[in-house]
Amino acid sequence: MELKQISKRLVIYGTLVIWTIKFFLRPFFSFEAPLQFFLGIAPNFLGSFLIPFGACWFFSGRNHRLARLFRTEDAGDLRQVCLLGFGLLVLNEYLQLFPVFGRTFDYFDILFSSVGLFFAWITFGRLQQKWQLA
């Protein structure tokens, strides 16, 4: 199975887990303090973890402008995707300070999005090396 197929499956399953947490677990069940905190940051952590995998799935093999910006062919491209993803994550979180969006700003979301993106950079980088050597 190639990296694009792994990325596709990981993004689909990860999105289903995020939706389960956001739309089923958190609204309908009450949890104690530590689990409630982890369910609060889990969508940010998982969503940021999926950024390079989503970029690989959606943009590999394509050549339009956006695909060239989010390509994941080598370690330099991966670093660029992760840095752009981090910038967009921080921008998204700071936009939540405006009451128009009806969402809440949280520094923990930025922190755990960063951690998720760091783990994604390491994981995707290792998979990328494995598939380039194979």
Image: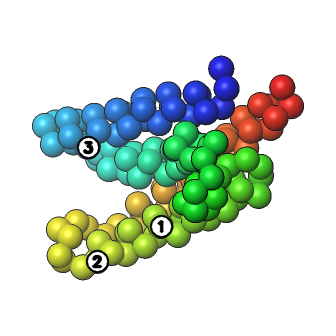
Residue 69 versus residue 116 in the image, above or below: below
Q: Where does label 2 land, which residue?
A: 97
Q: Nearer the viewer, residue 28 or 130?
A: 130
* Mark number displayed over residue 101: none
> Residue 109's image quarter?
bottom left
Residue at label 3?
22
Estimate the spatial distance between the alpha carbons at disc 3 and disc 1, rounded to whole Å: 20 Å
Q: Residue type at mark 1: give it.
A: Leu
Residue under pointer 1: 88
For the point 64% across and 58% down, the residue is: 68
Tag in front: 2 or 1: 1
Q: State the image coordinates of residue 92 (x, y, percent, origin top left).
A: 38, 68
Q: Residue furthest bottom?
A: 98
Please, which colouring scheme is shown?
Answer: rainbow
Q: Is residue 49 visible?
A: no
User: Is the residue under label 1 in contact with that under label 3 (CB below 8 Å)?
Assistant: no
Query: CA–CA distance between discs 2 and 1?
Result: 15 Å
- What's the residue at 84%, 26% (across, down)? 134
Q: Distance of mark 3 from mark 2, alpha carbons?
A: 20 Å
**Position of the N terminus by quadrant:** top right
For image coordinates 58% across by 27% down, the residue present is 5
Q: Amino acid at mark 2?
A: Leu
Q: Is residue 66 above or below residue 48?
A: below
Q: Is residue 125 left or right of residue 68?
A: right
Where's residue 52, x and y in %? 58, 48
Dot placed on the residue nearer the N-terminal end, 3 or 1 = 3
Q: Are marks 3 and 2 in contact (CB under 8 Å)?
A: no
User: Residue 35, located in which quarter of the rendered image?
Assistant: top left
